[in-house]
Amino acid sequence: MFAHFNLAILTVLLILHDQVHTGEIIGGHETVPHSRPYMVLLQQNKANGHSGHCGGFLLNENFVLTAAHCHAETYKIFLGLHNYHDMNGVQHLHVEKAFPHDDYDANTFENDIMVLKLKSKAEFNDKVKSIALADHGDGSLPQSCVVSGWGRTKEGSHMSLKLLEANVTLTDDERCAMEMFYCSKGETGPGKGDSGGPLVCGDGKAYGVVSTSSSPTPSASSIHRYTKIPTYKVWINSIINAISNINNER
């Protein structure tokens, strides 16, 4: 499914290396082009010279939210992207500073959330917009949830050239709740290639950040975990407000 592109940066982007606990959209379908204008494709440039990718989403014109395990030396952000064959209007931005959660645990993936401050502002238009974050609500599980991304569509395949999405149903799992995750089960959903993308539910707000997928046994259904955004909303806002105040004082 790979195609050759004139842009060198995309050539690098499409040469993917296997990554543990990154997400893919399995059992999904192509999104309506630019119907999810908050979506971000995040290129990771790592210290060992390798590159990879994660998903993410726009909080406002200056900040992106993604997973802490997507941390890298440097990043390139793609906004307004749907199909690699059509780069018209796609914005290429860089990251000024990354803020992974201080209590992120690389072994358990607890607190798997990270804020990225962009070096330059995103230009909002019909293809690029932010998404609102969910509040705590009444404690019930969100309904009618969707995950989206450009990840691999099956094990061993290349990343999708088009943005895909899949419907997922959250499960009432006590362990997930204790670890501050939402969870879904089954083969449909994220697994490898789209970590950091949003879990968007019925009211159109982002409820979770795609974190990890695992199977207790080879024959068991996959368990997909999403970092609960309402739990971290105060933390997210504290970073945005602190950086905004610094910039206002300059």
Image: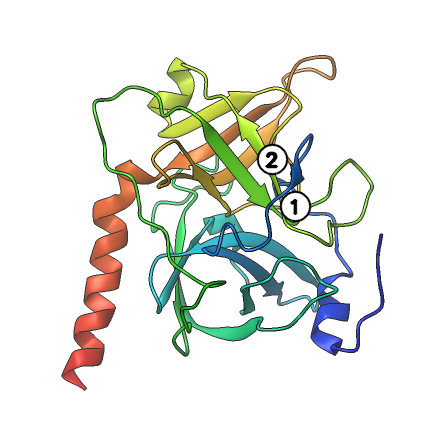
Determine whether, in the image, residue 109 is placed left or right of residue 20. left
Query: Which amino acid is tagged 2?
Result: Pro
Q: Residue 58: percent from the left, percent from the top?
A: 41, 58
User: How many labels sit on residues?
Assistant: 2
Q: Is residue 89 above or below residue 232?
A: below
- Label 2: few (<14), some or many (≥20) within 10 Å? many
Asked whether residue 195 is in view, the answer is: yes
In the image, is 126 to the left or to the right of 233? right
> As rendered, which of 156 and 203 lies closer to the eye?
203
- What is the quadrant of residue 138 in the picture? top left
**Discs 1, 2 touching: Cβ within 8 Å:** yes
Foreground of the two, 204 or 195: 204
Which type of secondary structure does the marked residue at label 2 adopt?
A: loop
Determine whether 167 is above or below 217 in the image: below
Q: Amino acid at mark 1?
A: Gly
Residue drawn at x 69%, y 15% is 217
Which residue is disc 1 drawn over?
A: 193
Inter-mark Cα distance, 1 to 2: 8 Å
Q: Is residue 50 left or right of residue 168?
A: right
Say which quarter of the image contains residue 203. top left
Query: Residue 190 shows which numbered tag?
Result: 2
Q: Can residue 107 be seen by looking at this rendering? A: no
Percent position of residue 223, x then y? 57, 23
User: Residue 201: image x %, image y %?
Assistant: 40, 33
Image coords of residue 94 (percent x, y): 50, 74
Q: Residue at x 41, y 77 (%)?
A: 119
Query: Label 1 neighbourhood size at 10 Å, few (<14), some (14-19), many (20+)?
Result: many
Position of 109 compared to 32: left or right? Answer: left
Relative to 91, does residue 29 appear above or below in the rendering? Answer: above
